[in-house]
Image (cartoon, helix red, strand yellow):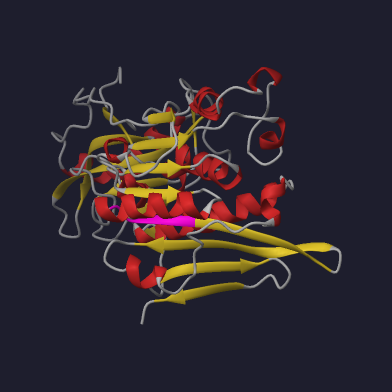
Amino acid sequence: MDRGYALRFDSKCLVVRNIPYLSSQLELCYGAIVSKLVFTDQNHVIQDDHQIYFAGDVPYGLNGQPIPNLAGGATTMQLAKPDVVVQRSFSNKPPNGFANLAEKIDHYVTILAGPALSRFPDAKIYTFDVDHDVVEDSIFKFHDTLTSRAEIGDLAAKFKEDVVALIGLGGTGSYLLDFLVKTNVKEVRGFDSDAYYIHNAYRSPGSVLEAEFRRPKVEVYQARYDNFRHGLKLVDKFIDASCAEDLAGVAFAFVCVDKGSARKEIFDLLIALGIPFIDVGMGLNRQDGALAGMMRATLLQPATAANILSQNLVETSDQPGDEYRTNIQIAELNAINAGIAILRYKQWRGFYASDAATYHLVMETASNRLFSFTCP
């Protein structure tokens, strides 16, 4: 910055703009260097590796040939500001690597801009044009370096306007909460009216404090995740047909309740409000002395919900004697059930690819098989 580089911080990357280079016609062009950063804490970064990304065409030397010894190739990277469009990557690692990020940038500037500065001496690199408008994630309280390192910012952005309701924070619901807190949704709105007891600790993620027992679940989980993100609102409430106002603005919902009668009332409300949702469920029984059963995730959308419900794939009335309600500790199955549900939601949003319009996913524990039901 002191030397005058046109710097910007965007999507956990250092962007160095105004880099002159020569085109194939030896014309003066300007591009930008992009280098991924790794945050060691909230305020310190280290360089990711020896490579850079470049927003610009192939740079040429004075001899009219592409600059040699620049490994890499055509690629893309999603940045928040649209004026810098990454088109390729370069790799030119010196024998001893780079001591620091400044050395790395200087190295590539010399290679890329050297021919242009020789042919056009008046071309300027050091413009002191620092962009102080830091492009930052608005929802997370920690830098989301996972997204930037994986180069999936364009996919993560698919959730950014979603308000997601999570109805029920029991075993599967607690794992879904953990997944949603770390997803780039605008708001996670959770509802549960139960207290947090010892058995909940055995089938929910995270560490446990003895002082948490007997407190409302929503208070426990609000405190547990409040330092991770903005837009987390957990309410001590049982959702029923009278709760339309609580779901105002919700784009998608997860239903994680184990009573069929409660599920039906919630279904009717969500369908009436036009909110698509995924219902999760689990059933266990003893098979030759061991536990066996299934985990289910069912996607219901207003236009198709009636048809799916008519297939009796989901319990909407109370069934006595369900072994799942006897507090058997099944954290791994809750986690798998939540994983199946969040996978289907992210497919629905276009984050993950999906080959078919699957509305019902079932995994059996004994056979280790996953079954899917798709729309014709």
Residue depicted at 50% across the width and 32% down the height = 193
Between 183 and 235, the one lying in front of the other is 235
**Was residue 278 drawn as part of the magenta stretch in this picture?**
yes
* Direction from residue 217 to residue 211 in the image, left or right: right
Q: Name above or below for residue 265 compared with residue 25.
A: above
* Direction from residue 327 to residue 81 in the image, left or right: left
Residue depicted at 58% across the width and 41% down the height = 170
Q: Position of residue 62 (x, y in %)?
A: 24, 52
Q: How many marks?
A: 0
Q: Position of residue 116 (x, y in %)?
A: 21, 44
Between 41 and 280, the one lying in front of the other is 280
Q: Most extreme residue toward the right, as rendered?
A: 289
Dividing the image into 4 quarters, which one contains the N terminus? top left
Can residue 242 be seen by looking at this rendering?
A: yes
**Was residue 243 drawn as part of the magenta stretch in this picture?**
no
Q: Main secondary structure of the magenta part?
A: strand
Can residue 61 be seen by looking at this rendering?
A: no
Start and end of the magenta stretch? Answer: 275-279
Q: Position of residue 102 (x, y in %)?
A: 42, 28
Q: Position of residue 254 (x, y in %)?
A: 43, 49
Between 50 and 358, the one lying in front of the other is 358
* Direction from residue 290 to residue 285 in the image, left or right: left
Residue depicted at 26% across the width and 40% down the height = 80
Q: Name above or below for residue 321 compared with residue 205.
A: below
Residue depicted at 45% across the width and 60% down the height = 344
